[in-house]
Image (cartoon, helix red, strand yellow):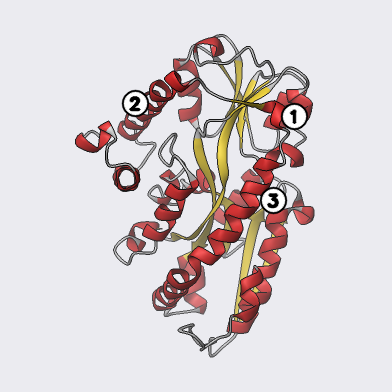
Amino acid sequence: MTFGQALKPGENGLPPPLEKPLYISVCLFDILGKNGDIYSRAKDLTLLARRWNVFVDIQVFTDERITAENFKAGQCDAAGISTLRARQFNQFIGSIDAVGAVPSYAHMRTVLHTLLEPKVIPLSITEPYQIVGVMPIGALYVMVRDRSINSIEKAAGKKIAVLDWDKSQAKMVQKLGAQPVASDITNFAGKFNNGQVDIIAAPAIAFKAMELYRGLGDTGAIYNFPLAQITGSLVINREKIRAKLPDLDQKIMSLREVGVQFLDKVLDQMFAFIDKEEAAIPAKYWMKIPEQDYAKYNQMMREARILMTKDGVYDPRMMKLLKKVRCKHEPSLAECSTNDE
């Protein structure tokens, strides 16, 4: 982060360095390994952390399942994984990526500010785990190999890649009359590119990294309609870190003050990067959804959220928080006068 160069312990409201060195190990998922942008940014943050006497050892993995399993097995003090995968460690934060719940990057900025409120922080804890940071990765867009699939109705009978460990996705696809194909973050792109599936959902950052233009070819398209917001989470094992840092909660609250002061600067850079990735996708691939379909699709996603909350997939407290954010941005929404979410 460019603004990070000016950050110094004990200045401008920032906390002083730790009295004793703190050594932390992090299992980090980056599908491109040490060549990935996530790993590169994480390395920059480790250099920044040294100013506060915190020394971070990053173990990077190209398989997210292995990343999470190693963390659960106690091989790392923390893990950097998708928030979808982090739901198993804390359902509240893990529900941020709910379908249709955060319509835009402006909404996401408000959500991330809200997560810094003192009354919200305890909800990020499910002992022995805590999610201490959330990073926007970008909107999730539907991508099709054949642009004639230009509506939900036309997806019936088509093969759609779904995460094999998130059963809710398969349920949603089946409700559309489509065929779910069990996949993972490491192989869904390959299945799309070689024709094993007709439809996937992915953020813009995956377009070049996973060569999705191969699957899109000359006939494919990307719906210019965010299905959800994808984020990454930093999960810590509180027991392991508290053994090294007894006043862990006090230090986390100190970091909250840093977040309040600098979050917008961080997000400005992150969203600029996401905008750049979206703009880099050739215009020929983007397909605009007919105006009359917007309300229909938003209603479908709302019904899916309510159903999956009842099924225990999403945390009802997070659904309530996200609804408040939507209604703050658009008070005239019909849902703002209802109590079903």
Residue mark closest to the camera, 2 vs 1: 2
| Quadrant occupied by the N terminus | bottom right
In the rendered structure, the answer to whether residue 40 lies left or right of residue 199 reads: right
Q: Earlier in the sequence, mark 3 or mark 1?
A: 3
Q: Residue at x 44, y 34 (%)?
A: 99
Q: Which residue is mark 3?
A: 30
Q: Residue at x 55, y 86 (%)?
A: 9
Check the image and report above or below for 150 versus 189: above
Q: Say the numbered circle drawn on residue 235.
A: none
- Circle 2 sits in a helix, a strand or a loop, which is it? helix
**Inter-mark Cα distance, 3 to 1:** 17 Å
Q: Quadrant of residue 189?
A: top right
In this rendering, the label closer to the viewer, 3 or 2 = 2
Q: Are marks 2 and 1 in contact (CB under 8 Å)?
A: no
Q: Quadrant of residue 182?
A: top right
**Residue 192 % position (x, y):** 71, 24
SS at circle 1: helix
Query: Is residue 82 positioned above or below 248 on the image?
Result: above
Residue assigned mark 2: 303
How far across and down, in percent of the image, does residue 6 sit? 62, 80
Residue 206 drawn above or below residue 245: above
Instruction: Name the residue nearer the viewer: 248 or 198.
Output: 198
N-terminal of the pair, mark 3 or mark 2, is: 3
Counting residues from the start of the chain, the first of labels 2 and 1 encountered is 1
Q: Which residue is mark 1?
A: 190
